[in-house]
Amino acid sequence: MNDFIAARSQMALSLGFHIVFSCIGMVMPFFMAVSHFYWLKTNQVVYKNITKAWSKGVAIFFATGAVSGTVLSFELGLLWPEFMKHAGPIFGMPFSLEGTAFFIEAIALGFFLYGWNRFNRWFHWFTGLVVGISGLVSGILVVAANAWMNSPAGFDYVNGQYLNIDPIAAMFNDAWFSQALHMTVAAFVATGFAVAGVHALMIAKGKNVEFHTRSFRIAAIFACVAAVLQPLSGDISAKDVARRQPAKLAAMEAHFETRKSAPLILGGIPDEKNKTVKYAIPLPGMLSFMAHGDFSAEVKGLDAIPEDEHPPVAITHYAFQIMVGLGMVMMLLSFIYFIALWKKKSWLRSKWLLNFFVLATPMGFIAVEAGWTVTEVGRQPWIIHGVMRTADAVTPMPGIAYSFYLFTGVYVSLALIVTFMLYRQIQMVDKLYDVLPNENPEKH
Amino acid sequence: MLYVVIVYLWASILLYLLLGGADFGAGIIELFTSEKNRNRTRKTTYQAIGPIWEANHMWLIIAIVILFVGFPAIYSTMSVYLHIPLTIMLIGIIARGTAFAFRHHDAVVDDWQNVYNRIFTWSSFVTPLFLGIIAGSAVSGRIDTQAVNFLDAYIFSWLDWFTVAVGFFTTAICAFLAAVYLIGETDNETDRKRFIHKAQTSNILAVFCGFLVFTAAYFEGIPLFQWVFGNLVGAVAITAATLSLILLWYLLRQGKTKILRVLAGFQVTMILLTVTWQHYPNIVLLADGGYLSLTEHHGHAKTISSLGWALLLGSIFILPALFYLIYSFQQKNGAKEAH
Ligand code: HDD
Ligand code: HEM
Ligand code: HEM
């Protein structure tokens, strides 16, 4: 494995790992705030138990998110020193603000996790909410930094020099809003379906049905609302990409030739040599509509872009299909769930609906990883779109492959341990939180 | 604004050394605690640092963000030539943070605890060792940007007797800080005695490692003695630290916790002041006699001013909340254990 590929793989691995924990870190506090709120309002012990059970799990995820994030802030320099040397001062604004958001999050988390029975109950509840809000803010800020790489702003690039730097303009670049919106909603979709799926599985198995039914409901409602919004926000993203990164759009769609009323293709195997796509289903005019809101508009193909600026087409295309496909499936499932909630209460207790949710457990996270692959691989060969090539940014140190193997080992072990601990946590729900009818419900 | 940013950088390094250092130290103390007392040490550690460890480690992130936003040339040079120790330190940070969370939040308590404990204690030892090595390398003048072969560029940039001695010195300081801190966190006389004893041992070790640093510097041709005593601030600071050592030993016998903490913090602050003052504003010395300086190699003026504002604004939110967090969990009495 050459050093350049190793560096890219290590970056992708670290980010792909971190994103899972950061999604959970952003979203779970809101789920907990809801169940915590019910507990404070209704005094039903089951809600207290749900909050506590979730917060035990979340503590593990937080720690893993925090350390993997710390690694990232060093890795940017360890792997891409040339990039950071120039980009750091320009896109650093969101990172400096993010420091505050993380700090507040860590402080609030200390209050929340260790503050049971120590503080005013509503103050304690509020600290939990602060964890969620500052998590969301951090997520939005870091995505604004990433958006700058897609849509550089806030400087003039003259003869290889970066002049007239304006960190605020860099932060509010063209892509920040569409990306931050799409990412935030995605975090709710991914975490929501994952949590709902796990609880659905336990209900289906007939374990602690009361506990799991209520947890399921909280997670599922968040997830389904987000899943309905997600394609709308995806549409904004796609129009945005069409405008500022035609090469990425062309790669996403495996759209080789510039043409009017371009078809949207479903599936298919892109052949980059012959510039064709085999076995695809074309939907006439749909791509033009998706990219520009007009069925007959012209959509730039890869032929309009110099050969040495083409992103890898196949990976980007597959990843995009996976994201959109899963997005559609989750949206449908959400509609079914809403119908069940409003009109067909009997569906709520049916096995098939639960099974659908069990099947959907990993879908959100797969879509998140696929979406980031679209964004990042679709930006290649640029690290800063149109300004700096990824190959020029990589560290001169040889032997990065070993570093990649090392981190792969670490992340795989961590993933295994976290999964194992989560499994144990769920197994323990019976013992810890089952309140027998003759037992006195724990009073505050 | 540049000076505001520099002060924040220095302060976050200091706070990381004090707070994060005491965190690491707790793991080191556990590593060097006899089998029969380990459980008790563990419990004290958990109560003392459980709620605040994440916050303590944020100082490192703040420092690194200041570096890469404000002083990108320094950040990228260090990242390139100190890649290997930085990577080892990162692995240590991952291992430690996760093992600490795992051992306290695992729903089932069984043999896995041994695995977590072992990882926690060893990574608590290795991480500050490499932090020290990295700090030592910055001033040892071995980073050679002209080097052509792998060993010179990426190994000998950080590996010599001096940096290793600085590494052990840092580790000893962490253990010392933790021991002093833990004296005030126990609820019984035996443990108090134990931690007082640990504080004494680690203090002796720190002083010993300090001598090693000077000796190694001598053999590596680093004029450390001159750096430290060659200017007024350094000489006064180091003398104050040494004098306060006497007071510290006297108070240790009596186990006066609050004032001990202040003294230990004071000593570490003086040490950091001494070692940074002499080179200021240079923070990396290169093999060719060049240097990377905070006042020369900083980002664009606009960047520095927005970074400065971000830090100032951030402090308004962070500092009161942080003090309240520490204060609340200090008021142990009357607090009921959760669960
Ligand atoms: C639950 C996850 C999820 C789901 C269901 C979808 N997406 Fe997505 N998508 C993401 C999660 C995601 C993401 C991981 O969050 C990305 C990566 C970067 C970003 O801003 O969001 C992303 C990126 C991304 C991009 C690239 C943006 C850029 O490079 O700036 C486009 C064009 C879309 N998405 C479009 C869609 C469409 C049309 C969807 C229709 C169903 C869709 N996404 C569903
Ligand atoms: C967490 C979600 C993210 C994922 C899963 C992700 C994924 C990836 C992938 C797959 C690559 C390799 C692309 C290739 O070489 O073909 C990559 C590269 C990179 N990403 Fe991201 N990315 C994410 C977010 C970010 C963010 C927020 C930033 C910075 C603020 C960032 C910075 C980089 C950099 C610097 C590279 C290396 C240069 C490059 O290959 O373009 N990424 N990422
Ligand atoms: C799209 C990509 C990303 C998103 C949405 C994201 C979001 C988050 C969130 C919500 C947290 C706090 C939650 C938790 O601790 O689990 C977090 C932690 C962290 N992230 Fe990321 N992040 C992303 C990428 C990055 C990148 C590229 C970096 C580094 C340059 C980074 C650095 C950090 C750090 C240092 C922490 C630890 C903060 C702490 O101690 O709480 N993140 N991230």
Image: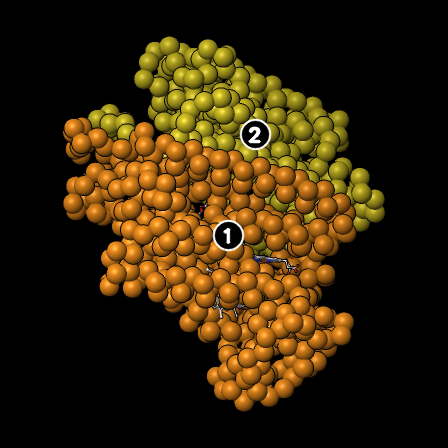
Chain colours: A orange, B yellow
User: Which one is nearer the viewer's eye here, A256 or B288?
Assistant: A256
Q: Residue at x 53, y 25 (%)?
A: B115
Q: Residue at x 76, y 50 (%)?
A: A1
Per the image, the residue denoted by label 2 is B123
Image quarter where the C terminus of chain A lies is: top left
Classify mark 1: residues with Cα within 10 Å, few (<14), some (14-19) or many (20+): many
The chain containing the residue under callout 2 comes to B
Asked whether the residues under marks 1 and 2 belong to the same chain, the reply is no
Horizontal side of residue A284 vs B85, given as left or right:
left
- Could you tell me residue B172's position as x and y percent? 55, 24
Classify mark 2: residues with Cα within 10 Å, few (<14), some (14-19) or many (20+): many
**Looking at the image, residue A374 lies above or below residue A79:** below
Q: CA distance from mark 1 to mark 2?
A: 24 Å
Q: Is mark 2 within 8 Å of ligand 3?
A: no
The numbered mark at residue A372 is none
**Looking at the image, residue A151 lies above or below residue A140:** below
Per the image, the residue denoted by label 1 is A19
Q: Nearer the viewer, mark 1 or mark 2?
A: 1
Q: Residue at x 29, y 56 (%)?
A: A347
- Could you tell me residue B339's position as x and y percent? 28, 29
- Which residue type does callout 2 highlight? Ser
Horizontal side of residue B35 vs B321, given as left or right:
right
User: Which one is nearer the viewer's eye here, B318 or A371?
Assistant: A371
The chain containing the residue under callout 1 comes to A
Q: Is mark 1 within 8 Å of ligand 2?
A: yes
Quadrant in which residue B260 is drawn:
top left
Q: Secondary structure at mark 1?
A: helix
**Looking at the image, residue B305 lies above or below residue A239:** above
Instruction: Say whether residue A62 is visible.
Output: yes
Horizontal side of residue B148 vs B81, given as left or right:
right
User: Which one is nearer the viewer's eye here, A176 or A366?
Assistant: A366
- Which residue type does callout 1 highlight? Ile
